[in-house]
Image (cartoon, grey):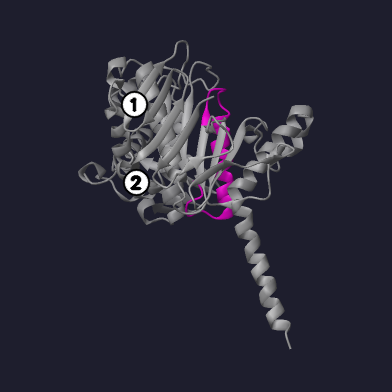
Amino acid sequence: MACLNVANFGPIKRIASTRKGLEERKVTMLIGPQGSGKSTLLKLLCACHWLEKGYAKGLLAQNAFQTADLLKHQFDYYRMASYEQADTVIDFQGEVLHLSYRHGKLDVDFKQGGQPPAKLLYVPSERSLVSLMKDYKAMRKLPESLLDFMGDYDSAKKYMVGDLNLGLPATSARYDAGCDQMWILHSKNKTRLEEAASGYQSLTPLKLTVEWAGNLKGKEDGDSLEERMARIKQRKLNATDASFGFLNFVEEPEQNLYPDAQVRVLNFLLSMANLRSQNKLMVTTHSPYLLNALTLAVKAGQILRVKKSAGKNMVRILPLKAAILDDDYAVWQLDEKGVVRKLEDFHGLPLDENFLNTAMGKFNSDFGKLQELEDEN
């Protein structure tokens, strides 16, 4: 289980609760107000895992870690170069690397025997741009992380066979390779993706790319498109292959979606995380619906652990593939002061007293105060 400790980096001041810092689980959810550092944490986790994978796959030699340039390049890649401070601390404990960054100096311990995941996917919050732009390679000022996601989306489109089920009632996506056009099919209507509702523009690249990356056995990030496609044709995809792992980093899955659709997207992401024991999902969110959907998935996992027969009726509530064991998840809260704390649980379930539910509760409280004003003589 990887751990990340961060202090004085961008909006993040420190990680409280544990000495190790943020401990990853199969499912890790980051919640908190705007600008509190959720995306910063997600990007740092992805950056550290990428460096670890690069070393494990032989793309980065040990001497490449002799300076802090590799890590600083990741800061630039995710547009976090200005986040570094004189007293910044970043400490990452992974499968094959221990990275320690202090006072601008990088120290690395190399481990033996670990096996990082074969695929990392970072799904940015700006993904809706992918649905609107075809000639993205000409847009040089876009973040590198977004350009790479666009490249993965292009690969996923070429791999696409048949229609993509978007997980919404009577709604799917269809790709016409001849004119490089993605269509949204809803009931009897057919709409170009760039002209469709904003929820479809956010959901389609997310679902297609995650499904492609999560099922692509043996994919390497450095391969050309031709090499990737040749490998797809040569190999049968095996969702139970224990030698393959997939790390999925997703910013705001709920973006522009109705509450019911938000829940469906999270259940899809949980199902993808459950495809293999090594898979992990890390998400940032502002949505109480996603946190409550995670609670349902954990409760389902608790019930199925002791009563497998309950699955027959449980499918009416959520997909069984989305059920999560209560020791396989963690929720971390970030406050406006830059402090990160692990959300406590109650009987294995996320505690109701959290930032998102508190925000929802304030509406009820304020409505009650308005009623009191109305009733005053």
Compared to residue 51, the image places residue 156 above or below, namely below
Q: What span is colored magenta in the figure?
A: 253-280
- Residue 349 lies, in percent from the top left, at 70, 40
Q: Nearer the viewer, residue 103 or 163?
A: 103
Badge 1 amino acid: Leu
Residue at 74% across / 31% down in the picture? 304
Q: Which residue is mark 1?
A: 106
Residue at 36% across / 48% down in the picture? 131
Within 10 angstroms of label 1, few (less than 14), some, or many (20 or more) residues? some
Residue at 76% across / 38% down in the picture? 313
> Regarding mark 1 in the picture, which secondary structure is present there?
strand
Please tell me the numbered disc located at residue 130: 2
Please tell me the numbered disc located at residue 240: none
Which residue appears farthest toward the top when viewing the image? 113
Residue 161 visible from this viewpoint: no
Compared to residue 112, the image places residue 240 above or below, namely below
**Alpha carbon separation for disc pair 1 and 2:** 35 Å
- Residue 93 lies, in percent from the top left, at 47, 24
- Residue 218 lies, in percent from the top left, at 41, 19
Q: Nearer the viewer, residue 309 or 19?
A: 19
Q: Earlier in the sequence, mark 1 or mark 2?
A: 1
- Residue 90 lies, in percent from the top left, at 41, 33
Q: Is residue 271 magenta?
A: yes
Q: Is residue 276 magenta?
A: yes
40 horizontally vs 335: left or right: left
Residue at 30% across / 41% down in the picture? 81
> Regarding mark 2 in the picture, which secondary structure is present there?
helix
105 horizontally vs 302: left or right: left
Badge 2 amino acid: Val
